[in-house]
Amino acid sequence: MRRLVIVLLAGALVLAVGCGQSSDDKAKKQVCDARSDLQQQVNGLQSLNLSNVTVSGVKNNLNAIKNDLKQIKDAQGELNSQRKAEVKQATQQFESQVKSIVQTLGSTTSLSAAATELGSAVNELASSFKQSLAKVDCS
């Protein structure tokens, strides 16, 4: 009986270890989940107009983007070298564009000018996402 228990435990251990995801797979999933959320945040910003925009809403989207970028950066070390290089370049490109956009926002004083400025910034952000992180393969 004791021998049977030991064999069953050993078998369970082998199955548990053998069926787990590799660190590269886990990192890829983390990157892809964050990339998906980034796309949602950018889409959310694109849907804003004068009737539904709020400062807190924009801040929430930008904070979520910041958190998604951090999640991607945290996962990079576990990716295989080719994917790591691809993700790192895309992340840097997108992050640079986000910083540039955030710096230019708020430089106008009128409401209509601010709306125009936000619209342009969001379009730039969407374009940057398409040119960088959207190209990262998550299939």
Image (tube, rainbow, N blue to C red):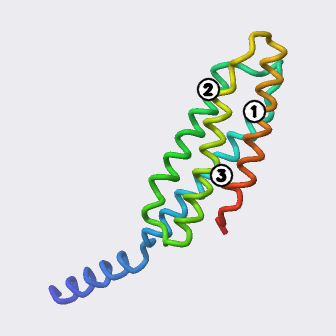
Q: Name the residue that disc number 1 marks.
A: 121
Mark 3 vs mark 1, CA separation in Å: 20 Å
Quadrant containing the C terminus in the rendered view: bottom right
Check disc 3 and give the amino acid type: Ser
Report which residue position mark 3 lands on. Answer: 36
In the displayed structure image, the side of residue 47 where residue 67 appears, left or right: left
Q: Which residue is mark 2?
A: 59
Q: From the viewer's perspective, is the residue at label 1 or at label 2 nearer?
A: 1
Q: Amino acid at mark 1?
A: Ala
- Helix, strand or loop status at disc 3: helix
Q: Which sits earlier in the primary sequence, circle 1 or circle 2?
A: 2
Is 11 located above or below residue 21 in the figure?
below
N-term-proximal mark, 3 vs 2: 3
Identity of the amino acid at label 2? Lys
Q: Are marks 3 and 2 in contact (CB under 8 Å)?
A: no
Nearest the viewer among 54 and 12 is: 54
Locate residue 120: give its quadrant: top right
Q: Looking at the picture, does residue 133 appear above or below residue 122? A: below
**Foreground: 25 or 105?**
105
- Can you give x and y, in whole percent of width and height, for residue 101 in the image? 68, 33
Please indicate whether residue 99 sits to the left or right of residue 48 in the image: left
The residue at the far left in this view is: 2
| Position in image of residue 72 (x %, y %) | 52, 53
As drawn, 23 above or below 12: above
